[in-house]
Structure formats: C-alpha cells, structure tokens
Amino acid sequence: MKPHEADIGLQRQRLGAWLEAWQLQQRLETLADPPEPPSPPEPQAYLPGSRSPEGTSPASRVHPGRLLAGAIILLPPDNEATRARPVYVALAEAVRGDAWLVVPFGRFPVPALPGELATGRVAPPLQVLCVWNHAPIAAERLARGWQVGRLCAREQRWLRQLLDLPPGRAPRKTLAQRLGPPLVHPLDPRHDYIEQERMLWLAGDEPSRCGESTVPCTADDNGTLPLAADEVDDTYQEDHEG
C-alpha cells in the first residue's frame, strides 16, 4: 500500500470511529429521561488527578494574574454548554491584556475535522484539541474554573504550529496524521457538530469577554489546516523537547 493510500485509510477509519461515537450520543439524547432518584448525587466532573497517566496535578483554583500558557482549565459551569458537560480548555496565549486565547478539548475520543488534533492522552476528556474552535476568554472567567494540569512541551509545540500555520501551508506529515478527516459532503453530520461546539462561546451568566473566535480559522478551512489524508511536506522540523 502506498503512503498516500495508507493516510486515506487512516482517515476513513478515524471518520468511522467518530461517526459511531456521534450516533451513539444522538441515540442516548433521544432516550426518555429515567425517573429521578429520591436523592440524586451531585454530578462530578472528571478532574485528572496526580496519579493520572498524564501526570497532571490535583485540580486547583488559579489567580487571574498567574495563568500561564499551556495550562489546562476546567471552565466554570456558567452557561448552558458548560452546565451540560465538563468543558476543558488549554491556554494558548495571552491576548488584549486581560484575556487568553483558549483551545477547547473535544467531547469525542477521535478528531472529527482537519482542525482537531489527537493528543494521544489516556484521559477521555483530554484526547482531542479542537484548534479550529479557539476563542478569547476573559482571565476573570478562567479564574472561576479549576486548573487540572498542563500541556506537555510536545503538545504545546503542536498547538503553536497549528495556530501559526499560514494559509495554504501544511504541517509536516507526522503532525497531519494526528488531525481529523476532511469535511466535504453538505449533509455530513459534522456540520451539526460544528454548530453545537460553537455554542461553547455563548455568553455566560455574568458578562465576560468570551465571544466566538476572532481569528480567521474555521473548522472546514482546508486552506488553513490541511486535509489529513493529503500528502504534506515537512513544513516544520521536529525538535527534541517533550
């Protein structure tokens, strides 16, 4: 099998796995709600602890002035999206003085789009970074959440490479193979998925600067983030950190 054919096969397999997870979630959402127990337990968000395979530290609050690039934050449940499920974000860089450009982790275990990156982590909430869905969030809102860990040096490098990728350029093949499959068909259910994920950035209960991404990078912008099944050149050279 030629390398290009192997890449296409990998993306078909990845798309099949994503569609299976998506369809399962859709079926679960259509089920009637079960009777509420007399004393329902409080919902517990997954907080990667110090003994996790990723080596993260216990969750803790963080002062707005002490936020650092690479931190993984569990957002506070202050809007419909963050109350529906735990939402984790990685801090990419400080912007506009009192805000951070953040990249959310996805809710599925495999990347759905060319703008989503498989991290290779074991913890289910931290397996996919949705780079296409990056957005600025106020430091004050992030401080109401919990820091649950950090991106490793390699993950930060991957994230930086994708965010800095010029239009029309592709990352090296080893990174492209971690991205999701291209979005082509107009009836592909991933269009619905994109609209749902954009709901993360609706305003919370309190005013905050957490609007949609203002950076020109979209989920299906194949000119910015490459089709992972395409042959790509070695735009970036791997270093030896991480």
Image (tube, rainbow, N blue to C red):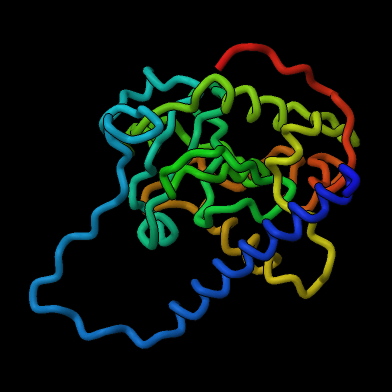
| Depth order, front residue of 32/11 | 11
Q: Is residue 5 above or below residue 194?
A: above
Q: Residue at x 47, y 43 (%)?
A: 126
Reply above or below: 213 against 220.
above
* x and y, in percent, of residue 224 in the image: 82, 39
Where residue 156 sits: x, y (%)?
58, 24
x and y percentages locating residue 192 in the rendered image? 65, 69
- In this picture, residue 49 sits left or right of residue 94: left
Residue furthest left as drawn: 38
Q: Name the residue nearer the viewer: 131 or 16.
A: 16
Q: How many marks?
A: 0
Closest to the observer, 4 or 186: 4
Q: Nearer the viewer, residue 97 or 178?
A: 178
Instruction: Give above or below for 211 relative to 31.
Output: above
Residue at image location 15% in from the left, 64% down from the top: 41
Residue 65 on image: x %, y %: 38, 18
Residue drawn at x 70%, y 31% as measured from the top left: 163
Image quadrant occupied by the C terminus: top right
Residue at 63% x, 22% y: name it. Answer: 157
Left or right, 11 with respect to 148, comes to: right
User: Which residue of the protein is positioned furthest toward the front in this rendering?
Assistant: 1
